[in-house]
Image (cartoon, coloured by chain):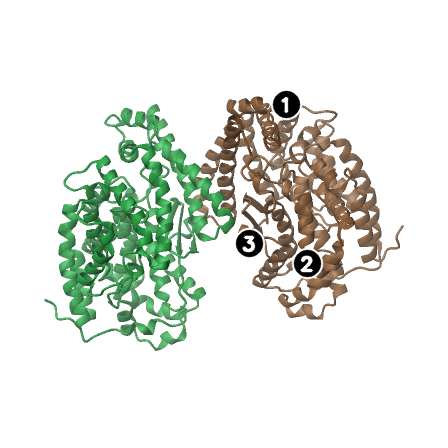
Chain colours: A green, B brown
Amino acid sequence: MVTQWNECEQQFMDYTKRIAQYEEAINLMYWDLRTGAPSKGVEGRSGVIATLSQTVHEWYTSDQMKLYINQLKDESKNELIQKSVEQCEKNYNQFVKIPPEEYKEYVVLQSQSEAAWEKAKETNDFELFLPYLEKMVAYNKKFANYWGYEDHPYNALLDQYEPGMTVNVLDDVFSKVRIALTELLHQVTQSSVQPDASLLQVDFPNEQQKAFSIEILKRMGYDFDAGRLDETVHPFAIELNSGDVRITNNYNEKDFRVATFGTIHEGGHALYEQNIAKDLAYTPLAGGTSMGIHESQSLFWENFVARSEAFWKHHYPLFQSYAPDTFKHVDFTSFYSAINEVKPSFIRIEADELTYCLHIMVRYELEKALINNEIEVKDLPQLWNDKMEQYLGIRPTSNKVGILQDVHWAGGAFGYFPSYALGYMYAAQLYEAMTRQIDVDDMIQNGDFTAIRQWLTEHIHQHGKKKKPLQLLMDATGEALNPNYLIQYLKRKYEDLYQIKGS
Amino acid sequence: MVTQWNECEQQFMDYTKRIAQYEEAINLMYWDLRTGAPSKGVEGRSGVIATLSQTVHEWYTSDQMKLYINQLKDESKNELIQKSVEQCEKNYNQFVKIPPEEYKEYVVLQSQSEAAWEKAKETNDFELFLPYLEKMVAYNKKFANYWGYEDHPYNALLDQYEPGMTVNVLDDVFSKVRIALTELLHQVTQSSVQPDASLLQVDFPNEQQKAFSIEILKRMGYDFDAGRLDETVHPFAIELNSGDVRITNNYNEKDFRVATFGTIHEGGHALYEQNIAKDLAYTPLAGGTSMGIHESQSLFWENFVARSEAFWKHHYPLFQSYAPDTFKHVDFTSFYSAINEVKPSFIRIEADELTYCLHIMVRYELEKALINNEIEVKDLPQLWNDKMEQYLGIRPTSNKVGILQDVHWAGGAFGYFPSYALGYMYAAQLYEAMTRQIDVDDMIQNGDFTAIRQWLTEHIHQHGKKKKPLQLLMDATGEALNPNYLIQYLKRKYEDLYQIKGS
């Protein structure tokens, strides 16, 4: 099918293609900085990134862009153009509503704040970070006002990461999830059945871990001709173009779970980007539609597939063939229980799938209250620890393992954290919808993920940004966001693992 | 020292800095394409490179650039500005003298021609390549006329790669070198003393070769905090910025010479770029001053240092500690003779240091005659083989190992080949000048290259493009290009190795 565009449409698509091309160059530079660029070149490279980023910013906010939006909005009959214009209009408004001087100051502050946070975390000194965090919060409050909102200023921030999501919806679904999970967590910690996770912490050479990671990625359908795997301190997936979606992971010789589940998680993100319809390439609709939907894809593979009993029934022998000999003496049940150990801990990124959402809720409630002037930045350490105690039953022993652990707020990313918990809920709901059409468990147990990946591509991946997250969810599952699927999934799994009599 | 620039000067330097930044982004994309970018992303990435390259081209040839040149030329009192303007003016003229339509056609033809060459080489079919090569030659003849020249049209092409060099100079020095080397080569091949190079061709694991390469690079003074070593099919060095100069090499498990001498060669290029004065960074004067001077740096290290007796006297035990056990039974003299084996062969990039220049002269004479309408493209295979027989005493058995072996002409790089031979002559002349000031042999034999690297940095590296090649040579050695140093060096070395009675 040849797309017929009129002259203005063609010009607009050429204009946005050039933006996408610049973003690809910038992304490659980011990838390179994290995967081994030499230290002495970093300052110069940062200058190159800044120059290209500034140009991209100028194009997003140019009079030319405004002209395209005005000319094509409500005029174009072409769906791709319509949705692309919509996407550009959102970006345009997001940027131009902030006075240029303020935006510049904010960008400078961002890097200062991240540097201060890094030092504060290193030295466990919240006071060092406090003045920066106060400014970041103040700016974001202002931005929320510039952008405008209904009901709650936090909605304006949320909309950046999860278009259409609101405090009303989140308060409702989060409270349901929180009540169910805190109860379940209580039962789990009280259970007399407790797995022994120490058996997992044995020497496992990185090379072997890597070989196993690659094998699993191939089985998931990650296309190595359209990507590559590298090593970084913090794992990530990055799309350069849909034929080049790279992932990184990190190896811990004493704990294979870091690399194994990390790789599968990033692989889930990468499958999304690799399978976006080719006709969206280099348009404003290329890329995942939201942080939450992206996270649903990584969590679907990491948890619903790769932490399942069915998965390890098939893959445990394969794993044993890569693993040190000690695993030959670990029976399947002990292994499966151990990798699903539930244990409240301070650090979000190390949390198990049951407590993870509770970590998110601590953050959500605090940032929502900050933006709404209900609490003050200086009181955060105390408030953080109180909430941790309330939800997870443990109190951080220092700010380093409390309020200072995440970079998000230092960079001004308020409204981002809920995406992680939404990703869990979306994934559970997708899993449920998928099982109504195909025998997912059976496929996982047979080690053939083709139909699963195809289902995700059909319902999620291919659409890129053509569908907004809540529409995508509705079309894929036939209903609006429903937290019960996550609750049911976790109850079923952990009541079974911890031999809790179901309520 | 704070540089004082007026407003126009500052604007010009900002303008050219942005060009340099774009070139850095483009170079990173090239590096990435060659070091492991996934195949399915290549098409998109090529589009990104094309978009950025077009912008750079527009900036080099813009009315704004012309304005800067006119305003600053002969006006600015600042040396850095003056030389930068001079550099930009040269680029400007080179581009704008070619009609834009013709330049566009040429760029398209370039990739078609390279693709045709690749196929022709693969299938040993010169006829396939002939029509493209004819067009490339025709374009370059036209360009020479657009650019203008004195005495000989080839001078216009030569000036792109080796500013200031002329056919008159080359004819003179090349004929001297050719006469001396063909005679020396005759003596060498007739000598009853012949090294046994087969002893070098033993299994040598890549990992061990790599470890040895890294060790030698460190000793040379290659700064790994300002670079990295990767593996590619064709080794190269590339400057992203002066704090990020990367090299690649290629491993042959059956012949360590490929990686060892390849690494040292690229390391020589990289040392040049790493040691350019920091105040030239992101100016038009960053980077090596010419292809010939660049090659002098790689060859200085590869041949004058790393193929010398002094080098191996110190490093052979180190080499043996990395090498397979078989080398424990190879005595020093056999090893040193073997790595300096002279043997006429068809392929330029596999040539020893004695025959290498003869390969270049074959190409130089043919391309000079082509550009001057003295010969025709269709006759090249025959002419090539005749010249090879005349200079090296061997006749290529196919076009694949003859006229089709190099990519240069396919890409239109006429005038480039002489740089390689000039690099040999420059290196020999630099070596001679250096020995008048420091005891080079002694330092090499002690394994301490500090003073050697410092000498090169002082006389060559730091100046970047601030000095033209022939001026650089004059300032560093006190005289104009003199081919006798290369002739003397080769005679001394190979008469000794092959026990030829000196004439």
Element marked by disc 1: helix
Residue beneath disc 3: B224
Residue A443: name its quadrant.
Answer: bottom left
Q: Amino acid at mark 1?
A: Tyr
| Above or below, B54 relative to A28 | above
Near mark 2 (Cα within 10 A), the count class, few <14, some 14-19 or many ≥20, is some
Q: Estimate the x, y position of residue B125 in percent, counting from the top left.
A: 62, 40
Mark 3–mark 1 contact, CB under 8 Å? no
The reply to the same-chain question for discs 3 and 1 is yes
Q: Nearer the viewer, residue A176 or A477?
A: A176
The reply to the same-chain question for discs 2 and 1 is yes
Residue B146 has which mark? 1
Q: Earlier in the sequence, mark 3 or mark 1?
A: 1
Which chain is disc 3 placed on?
Answer: B
How far is disc 2 from disc 3 in space, using C-alphas? 18 Å
Residue A110: name its quadrant.
Answer: top left
Residue B448 has which mark? 2
